[in-house]
Image (spheres, rainbow, N blue to C red):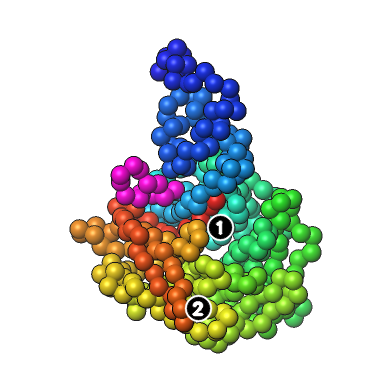
C-alpha cells in the first residue's frame, strides 16, 4: 500500500477523537481494523485505546488458549477465540513465539488484560491488548508441579519439590509464594509450612471460591484448601472431594465441571455443600460429548461459561467450544442454555494446556 493511499484511509481527525470512536467498536472487529493501515495497527496496539475503553465501561471478555504441539512437545502457542462476522468461533494463533521457553509444567492465570505464565523458575506476562510478552522477575524458589490462582489481583503459586531432609531422606515439601500484579513483585515472605495434607507430587486441578484456594489431588487425602489471610491449610470437604473434578471453573462462587463419563455439567455450591447436575443440557451433552476424552470449563463473563471438549467430527479429531449461559432458579436449581457450539480447531491433535478468560 502506498503512503498516499494509506493516508487517505486515515481520517483527518485528532488522535483523541479517533481513539474515542474506535473504543466504541466491538473488540472482535479489531483484527480486521488492524489490516487497514500501519497507523490503525499502531492504534489497535495502543494502551490509550484500552484505557479509553475501560473509562467508557466497554470492556469485553475474550478467551485465550495455550496449546502444545504433541509432535515437538516443547512447541507452545497462544490462541484467541475469534468470531468472524456471520461465522462461527475459531481459535486463531496470535504470535508464534509468545510462549518461548515455557514448558509442559507451566501454569497460567489471567489478571485484567494480562495472562501470567509460570515455569519451574521463570515467569512471563502476556499483554492481551497488544499480544506481546515480556519476562517478569524469577520465582523466588524453584517450584515444580505447581498450580496458580488469583485472589485480589495477587497470584498464589502452590507447589514444591522433593527435597532432602536432615536425615538424608527425600520428602515432598509444599510452599506458597505470592506475586503482586499491582507492584509486579514477589512478596518477601514465603509460606513454607510442613503440611499434613497435600502430600502427593501431582494435583489434578485448582480453583478459587469464597476467597480460598481449593486444590484437588488424585485422592481425598491430598485434596486441600488454603486460606490466604490466615495462611492456614486444611483438608478439603469430603463432599467436594468426592467428585474427581478436573477442568473446572467458578462462576458466582459455584464450581462447575464437565463429567465426561456421565456426560453432564455438574455444579458444587459451597454454601449448601452439595453437588447437582445443571439442568437443560442433557440432550446436547449426550450428543456432542459422547466420546470426549477431556474437557475444560472456563468462566466467560457474567453468568456464563465456555466448555472446550474433544470429539470426532466427520472422521477428524477436532476441538469444540460451547458457550453456555447459566441461571439459578427458585429452589436453588441451576439451569444451563447452550448459546453456541462450534468446531474451533479442526486438527484436534493438540495438547490442551490451559484456557483463560481475559478482560480487554
In the rendered image, is residue 133 in sight?
no
| CB contact under 8 Å: marks 2 and 1 | no
Placement of 289 over or under 269, stated as above or below: above
Query: How many angstroms separate mark 2 from mark 1 (CA)?
Result: 23 Å
| Residue 352 - label | none
Q: Position of residue 359 (x, y in %)?
A: 55, 51
In the rendered image, is residue 284 in sight?
yes
Q: Looking at the figure, which quarter contains the N terminus?
A: top left
Q: Secondary structure at mark 2?
A: strand
Q: Secondary structure at mark 1?
A: strand
Residue 161 vs residue 105: left or right? right
The residue most toward the front is 330
- The residue at the point 76 percent across, 75 percent down is 230
2 or 1: mark nearer the eye: 2
Q: Which residue is mark 2?
A: 268
Q: Position of residue 64 (x, y in %)?
A: 47, 52
Tell me the magenta residue range.
80-91
To which quarter of the image does residue 156 belong?
A: bottom right
Q: Is residue 124 magenta?
A: no
Placement of 188 over or under 165, stated as above or below: above
| Residue 108 - label | 1
- The residue at the point 43 percent across, 43 percent down is 28
Amino acid at each position: 500500500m502506498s503512503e498516499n493511499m494509506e493516508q487517505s484511509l486515515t481520517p483527518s481527525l485528532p488522535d483523541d477523537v479517533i481513539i474515542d470512536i474506535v473504543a466504541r467498536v466491538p473488540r472482535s472487529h479489531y483484527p480486521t481494523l488492524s489490516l487497514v493501515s500501519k497507523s490503525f495497527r499502531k492504534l489497535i496496539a495502543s494502551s490509550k485505546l484500552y484505557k479509553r475503553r475501560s473509562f467508557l465501561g466497554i470492556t469485553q471478555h475474550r478467551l485465550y488458549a495455550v496449546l502444545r504441539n504433541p509432535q515437538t512437545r516443547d512447541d507452545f502457542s497462544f490462541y484467541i477465540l475469534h468470531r468472524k462476522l456471520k461465522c462461527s468461533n475459531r481459535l486463531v494463533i496470535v504470535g508464534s513465539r509468545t510462549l518461548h521457553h515455557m514448558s509442559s509444567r507451566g501454569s497460567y492465570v489471567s489478571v485484567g488484560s494480562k495472562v501470567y505464565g509460570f515455569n519451574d523458575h521463570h515467569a512471563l506476562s502476556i499483554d492481551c491488548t497488544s499480544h506481546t510478552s515480556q519476562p517478569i522477575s524469577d520465582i523466588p524458589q524453584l517450584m515444580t508441579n505447581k498450580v496458580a490462582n488469583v485472589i485480589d489481583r495477587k497470584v498464589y503459586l502452590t507447589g514444591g519439590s522433593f527435597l532432602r531432609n536432615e536425615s538424608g531422606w527425600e520428602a515432598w515439601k509444599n510452599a506458597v509464594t505470592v506475586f503482586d500484579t499491582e507492584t509486579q513483585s514477589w512478596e518477601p515472605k514465603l509460606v513454607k509450612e510442613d503440611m499434613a495434607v497435600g502430600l502427593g507430587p501431582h494435583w489434578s486441578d485448582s480453583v478459587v471460591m469464597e476467597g480460598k484456594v481449593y486444590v484437588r489431588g488424585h485422592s481425598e487425602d491430598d485434596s486441600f484448601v488454603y486460606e490466604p489471610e490466615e495462611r492456614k491449610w486444611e483438608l478439603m470437604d469430603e463432599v467436594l472431594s468426592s467428585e474427581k473434578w478436573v477442568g473446572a471453573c467458578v462462576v458466582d462462587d459455584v464450581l462447575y465441571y464437565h463429567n465426561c463419563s456421565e456426560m453432564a455439567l455438574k455444579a458444587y455450591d459451597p454454601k449448601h455443600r452439595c453437588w447437582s447436575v445443571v439442568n437443560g443440557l442433557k440432550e446436547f451433552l449426550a450428543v456432542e460429548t459422547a466420546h470426549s476424552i477431556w474437557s475444560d470449563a472456563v468462566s466467560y463473563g457474567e453468568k456464563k461459561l465456555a466448555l472446550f471438549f474433544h470429539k470426532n467430527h466427520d472422521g477428524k479429531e477436532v476441538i469444540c467450544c460451547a458457550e453456555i449461559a447459566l441461571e439459578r432458579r427458585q429452589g436453588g436449581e441451576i439451569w444451563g442454555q447452550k448459546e453456541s457450539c462450534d468446531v474451533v480447531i479442526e486438527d484436534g491433535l493438540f495438547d490442551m494446556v490451559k484456557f483463560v478468560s481475559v478482560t480487554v
